[in-house]
Image: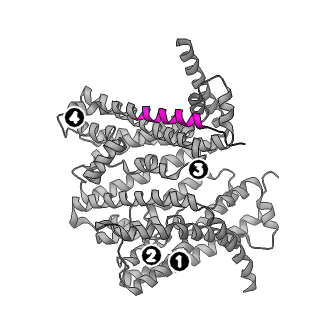
C-alpha cells in the first residue's frame, strides 16, 4: 500500500515536471498567456469596485469583505483548473481515444488523467488570485485569530476540492454523452463568476439551493460569516469539511461511468 | 451587385452550418437562462442596498440582461471565428488568398453569418422564456414601436461594429504566430469597455462619459438600452451617430490594414 502510494506521488510529480518542461519550450507564448490571464481577471475586480463604490455595500458587505470572498473563490477555481485540468478537458481525452490508452497502463486512471493535463498555464490566474487575496486581507476588516487563519485555509482547500469534483462529475457524464455538457458550466464557471459575492445576496432561496443541492455555501457563505465576525458559531469555520460528501458522490458517478465506458471508437 | 453575390454565398453557407448545432444550442440556452436569472438577482441585491444610487429603471436592467443573453453569441468577442485563426495558423490561408475574392469581405461575411445563425437559434427560445417569467425578472415589451424599430436597426449596426472590430484580431494573427495571449488581452479589454461586465450606466460619471465615445459602446450598449427607453432623445441620437461613425471608421481601417498584411504575409508550413 505504502510503496504504491509513493509510486503514485512520484509519477504525479514526474507529470508536472514534464508539463513544466514542455511549456517552457514556448517561453514568449507562455509569458504572454500568463500576463493575459493576469489582466483578464482584473475586469472582475474593477466591476466589483465600481459597483461597490456606487452603492456602498451589498447586503451589508463592504468592498473589502466582498474582495476577500471573491479572491478566495478565484484562488479555489484557479487551483482547481490547474490540478483538475484533465477532468475539465475530459471530453477531448475520450474522443481522441486517449482514454483507451490510459486504461491499458498499470496505473490509476484518475492519476493519469489529472497528471497528463496539469495546466501549468493557469499560473497567471493563481498569481493574480494571490495578489488579490493579499490585497483582500489587507483591506478587509477581519480580526485575525488562529481559528480564522485556519478557516481561510480550509476554505481554500475545500473550495479547490469542490471545483475539482464538479469537473470530475462532468467528466463522469462524458462517459455517456462523449460531448461535454454546456449546462455543467453553470456549476463551475457560473459559480466562479457569481461566487464573488457571498451567496446570501442572491436571496434566501438561492442560499438554500446552494446549501442543500449544490454545496457552495459550505466553502463560501458559512465560513465567511465566521471569518468576518458576523456570527459566534465558530463551527461554521469547519463547514468546508462537508465537501467530502460531494467528493463521494462524484467518485460514485465516476465509477458508474467507467463501467459503462465503451470507447469513442477512434 | 453581382460582385457581392459570392459574399452572400459565403454568408449562406456559414448560416446553414450554424443552424446544424441544435442540441448544443438547447443546452446552451438552459445555461444562459440560469445565468441571466443570477445576474438579475445580483442587480436586485444592489438596488435594495441603495435604491437612490441605482442609475436606471430596474425593468430596463432586466431587459438589458435578457437581451444580452439572447444575443450573446452575436456580440461576444471571445467567440471569434476559429476557422479563420486555424487557416492562418495551418497555412490554409494560402488557398484563400488564391481565390478571386477579397479576404476581408469574405471573413466579414462569414463571421456575420455564423454570429447571426448562432444568435437566431438561441435568442428565440431564450426570449420566450424571459417573457413568461413571473415577477420582477420578466422581460418587458419595448418602450414603444419607434424604440423597437430603432432597436432592430441599431442591433445590426452594433453587430457590424463588433465584427469590424473582431476583424482586427484576425489581421493581428497575420503578424504574430502565437496570437492567443494578445487576443486574450484584447478581448477582455473589450468586454469591460463595452459594458459586458457591468452595464455602462453603472460606471462612475467620468469613466462612463469617456466610454460612451469609444466604439465599444456602439456594440450592444446602444441597442439594448434603446429597447427599454433607457437611451432616448438627444443622447440616443448621439449614440446612433457614433455607432455609424465607428462602423465606417473601423471598416476602412481594417481594410487598409488587411491589404498591408496581405502584401507581407508569410505562409506557415504547408
| Chain letter of disc 2 in the image | B
Q: Depth check: A68 or A97 in front? A: A97
**x, y (%) of residue B62?**
35, 68
Judge from the rendering whether residue A59 lies leftward or rightward of residue A9; answer left or right: left
Do pointers 4 and 1 mark residues of a single chain? no
**Crowdedness near tag 1: few (<14), some (14–19) or many (≥20) residues, C-alpha within 10 Å:** many
Main SS, magenta region, reads helix
Farthest left residue? A232
Q: CA distance from mark 4 to mark 2?
A: 47 Å
Magenta stretch: residue B202 in it? no
Magenta stretch: residue A260 in it? yes
Q: Which residue is mark 2?
A: B223
Q: CA distance from mark 4 to mark 1?
A: 53 Å
- Of helix, strand and loop, which one carries label 3? helix
Q: Depth check: A181 or A225 in front? A: A181
The numbered dot on residue B157 is 1
The magenta segment: A246-262
| Chain letter of disc 3 in the image | B
Q: Are marks 1 and 2 in contact (CB under 8 Å)?
A: yes
Do pointers 4 and 2 mark residues of a single chain? no
Q: Earlier in the sequence, mark 1 or mark 2?
A: 1
According to the image, what is the colour scheme of the structure? Answer: one colour
Q: Which residue is mark 4?
A: A143
The numbered dot on residue B181 is 3
Above or below, A48 against B239 in this view is: above
Q: CA distance from mark 1 to mark 3?
A: 29 Å
Residue under the point 49% across and 58% down: B189
Amino acid at each position: 500500500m505504502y510503496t504504491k502510494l509513493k509510486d503514485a506521488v512520484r509519477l504525479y510529480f514526474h507529470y508536472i515536471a514534464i508539463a513544466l518542461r514542455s511549456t517552457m519550450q514556448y517561453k514568449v507564448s507562455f509569458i504572454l498567456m500568463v500576463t493575459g490571464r493576469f489582466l483578464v481577471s482584473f475586469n472582475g475586480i474593477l466591476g466589483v469596485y465600481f459597483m461597490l463604490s456606487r452603492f456602498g455595500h451589498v447586503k451589508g458587505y463592504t468592498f473589502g469583505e466582498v474582495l476577500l470572498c471573491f479572491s478566495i473563490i478565484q484562488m479555489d477555481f484557479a487551483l482547481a483548473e490547474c490540478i483538475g485540468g484533465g477532468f475539465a478537458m475530459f471530453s477531448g481525452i475520450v474522443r481522441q481515444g486517449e482514454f483507451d490508452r490510459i486504461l491499458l497502463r498499470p496505473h490509476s486512471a484518475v492519476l493519469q488523467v489529472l497528471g497528463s493535463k496539469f495546466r501549468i498555464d493557469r499560473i497567471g490566474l493563481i498569481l493574480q488570485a494571490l495578489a488579490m487575496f493579499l490585497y483582500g486581507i489587507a483591506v478587509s476588516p477581519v480580526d485575525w485569530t488562529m481559528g480564522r487563519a485556519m478557516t481561510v485555509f480550509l476554505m481554500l482547500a475545500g473550495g479547490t476540492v469542490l471545483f475539482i469534483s464538479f469537473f470530475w462529475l462532468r467528466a463522469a457524464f462524458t462517459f455517456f454523452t462523449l460531448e461535454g455538457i454546456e449546462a455543467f458550466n453553470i456549476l463551475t464557471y457560473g459559480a466562479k463568476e457569481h461566487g464573488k459575492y457571498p451567496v446570501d445576496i442572491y436571496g434566501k432561496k438561492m442560499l438554500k439551493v446552494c446549501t442543500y443541492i449544490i454545496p457552495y455555501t459550505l466553502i463560501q457563505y458559512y465560513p465567511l460569516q465566521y471569518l468576518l465576525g458576523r456570527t459566534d458559531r465558530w463551527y461554521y469555520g469547519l463547514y468546508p469539511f462537508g465537501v467530502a460528501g460531494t467528493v463521494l458522490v462524484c467518485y460514485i458517478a465516476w465509477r458508474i461511468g467507467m463501467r459503462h465506458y465503451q470507447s469513442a471508437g477512434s | 451587385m453581382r460582385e457581392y453575390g459570392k459574399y452572400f454565398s459565403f454568408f449562406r453557407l456559414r448560416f446553414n452550418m450554424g443552424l446544424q448545432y441544435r442540441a448544443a444550442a438547447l443546452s446552451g440556452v438552459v445555461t444562459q437562462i440560469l445565468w441571466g436569472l443570477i445576474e438579475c438577482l445580483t442587480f436586485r441585491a444592489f438596488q435594495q442596498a441603495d435604491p437612490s444610487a441605482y442609475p436606471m429603471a430596474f425593468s430596463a436592467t432586466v431587459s438589458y440582461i435578457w437581451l444580452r443573453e439572447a444575443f450573446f453569441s452575436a456580440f461576444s468577442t471571445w467567440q471569434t471565428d476559429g476557422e479563420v485563426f486555424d487557416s492562418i495558423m495551418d497555412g490554409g490561408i494560402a488557398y484563400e488568398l488564391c481565390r478571386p475574392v477579397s479576404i476581408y469581405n469574405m471573413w466579414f461575411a462569414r463571421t456575420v453569418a455564423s454570429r447571426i445563425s448562432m444568435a437566431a437559434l438561441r435568442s428565440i427560445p431564450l426570449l420566450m422564456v424571459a417573457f413568461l417569467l413571473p415577477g420582477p425578472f420578466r422581460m418587458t415589451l419595448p418602450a414603444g414601436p419607434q424604440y423597437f424599430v430603432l432597436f432592430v436597426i441599431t442591433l445590426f449596426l452594433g453587430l457590424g461594429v463588433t465584427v469590424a472590430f473582431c476583424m482586427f484580431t484576425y489581421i493581428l494573427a497575420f503578424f504574430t504566430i502565437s496570437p492567443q495571449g494578445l487576443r486574450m488581452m484584447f478581448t477582455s479589454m473589450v468586454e469591460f469597455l463595452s459594458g459586458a461586465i457591468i452595464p455602462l450606466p453603472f460606471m462612475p460619471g467620468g469613466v462612463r462619459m469617456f466610454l460612451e465615445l469609444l466604439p465599444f459602446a456602439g456594440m450592444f450598449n446602444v441597442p439594448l438600452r434603446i429597447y427599454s427607453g433607457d437611451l432616448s432623445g438627444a443622447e440616443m441620437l448621439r449614440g446612433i451617430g457614433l455607432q455609424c461613425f465607428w462602423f465606417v471608421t473601423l471598416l476602412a481601417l481594417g481594410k487598409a490594414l488587411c491589404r498591408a498584411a496581405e502584401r507581407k504575409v508569410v505562409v506557415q508550413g504547408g
